[in-house]
Amino acid sequence: MYSVEFDSGSSRSLYVQIYDYLKKELADGRIVQGERLPSIRNMAKMLGVSVTTVRMAYDQLIVEGYLESRPQSGYYAIQGSWDGTGHGIREDSAYTHPVTVAQAEEHQNDMMYDPESFDFVKWKKCMASVLNDTPELLLSEGDRQGEPALRTEIAAYLYKSRGVVCGPEQVVISAGTQQLVTHIARILKVMGITLVCKEDPGYEPASRIFGDRGFAISSIPVRSDGIEIEKLPANIRSAVYVSPQNQFPTGALMPIGRRHRLLEWADDNDSIIIEDDYDSELRYFGMPVPALQGLDGGKRVIYIGSFTSTLFPAVRISYMVLPRDMISIYETMKMDYDQTCSKTEQLTLALFMQRGFYGANLRKIRNLYSHKLREAMDAIGEYGGKDGFASAENTRSGINIILRIDAGGGGDEKETSARLTDDAAGLGIKVRSIPQLSRDGMIYLIFYYNQIPAGEIRASVQKMLSAFRETVRGN
């Protein structure tokens, strides 16, 4: 039972008092890790306050890492995110309480991170401006489609950076790609499309969402220049989910000629292309190839992007650009979904982009990550390449490298992949397996080199490959 004793004589607003109460409940262990909190509407009813008041308190707890919002599920307490003091924030402050190194490491599951990869000082200045200069904007519920200020900034940025042609009214914002895919699934159903083609291997969460919603799924192989367009269905109205700039997980880049061929397929078959351009900004060699959406003029392409790779993982802000004739369909269903993206974070990001900080940070991390990539490649060659034990693929863009490990054959690739992933995690290195590619004794892993501080990459790769050798030999 949640019960806040409000101090009517206090200068602190109701949302700050709710924030302080919930934070203390978390710090004292009365709200435990993983516990689901009441919905905003139910909590408002329970405390006798407005929905907006509770939303602001929840938003602040999310910003500070005390709660997480899970799409279509609710709000949950996060482990290890409070400092145990029970103290609240100043109402006029954008700063959060410090978390000890031990708590941060526990919360991050002992994974490495690089504080140089994001300018938190400028982010905090923008958030302070939102909280201090325009608090009235936080006294109303967020726009279901996303805050207009952020949608305007995204539309302008996409045109300059990726050639995407759209207006703010075509942009839809959400907390993560998977909720956007859920919206797309509903739109496609209204359009009478029931077949979705996916890249194989590809982004499996999207495939599962479409499958769970009754779509027939067709797997289309990926080659060195992207999806095999020739194997897409003919004379059947369908949709295809592709990541042509940096195919996940192979890293294949679809050249301009193949992009035009894919657009021709969509026109010829009255079909839709879903373009997942998840990390197009992070290309380190050569010029980026224009987005499919811009080449198409925005007629048959749904464009998806995310800020996770270019800001920091805790900011779960993704977006899509819908063709104009799909906007009317989206309008009929958007009221069925709450906006799961924090309004405070959306407004902060809009200001961060407007002031030029996003572009400056992007230039900074491009230089930083390209340096890290060279360091990682050199280390992999030195400690794994001489005897062919380890080699690297997908080495021109993004935030990860594909590692191919020669496990010698004769073992269970799935089991070996899991053990290698655990080896890396034990060293604080993020690695994920790629079961679709692993076979015949060759293990494929996604290695997130971007999270390792530049000065530690060589030593980290050496330790990781040494641990991998011991595991493989033990098989």
Image (spheres, rainbow, N blue to C red):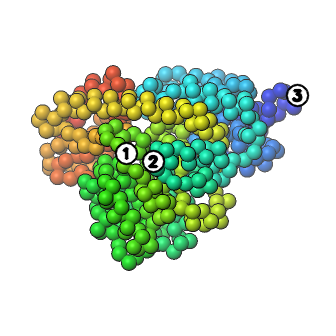
Tell me the amino acid under the disc marked 3.
Answer: Gly
**Residue lying furthest right in this view?**
9
Q: CA distance from mark 2 to mark 1?
A: 8 Å
Q: Residue at x 42, y 70 (%)?
A: 267
79 lies above or below 215: above
Query: Which quarter shows the C terminus?
Result: top left
Q: Quadrant of residue 23?
A: top right
Residue 22 position, x and y percent, is 69, 35
Q: Which residue is mark 1?
A: 288
- Residue designated by label 2: 162
Residue under the image location 55 percent in, 45 percent down: 156
Left or right, residue 310 beside residue 129: left
Circle 3 sits in a helix, a strand or a loop, which is it?
loop
Q: Evaluate if marks 2 and 1 touch, with contact meaning CB atoms under 8 Å apart.
A: yes
Q: Upstream in the sequence, badge 3 or badge 1?
A: 3
Q: Is residue 238 visible?
A: no
Mark 3, residue position? 9
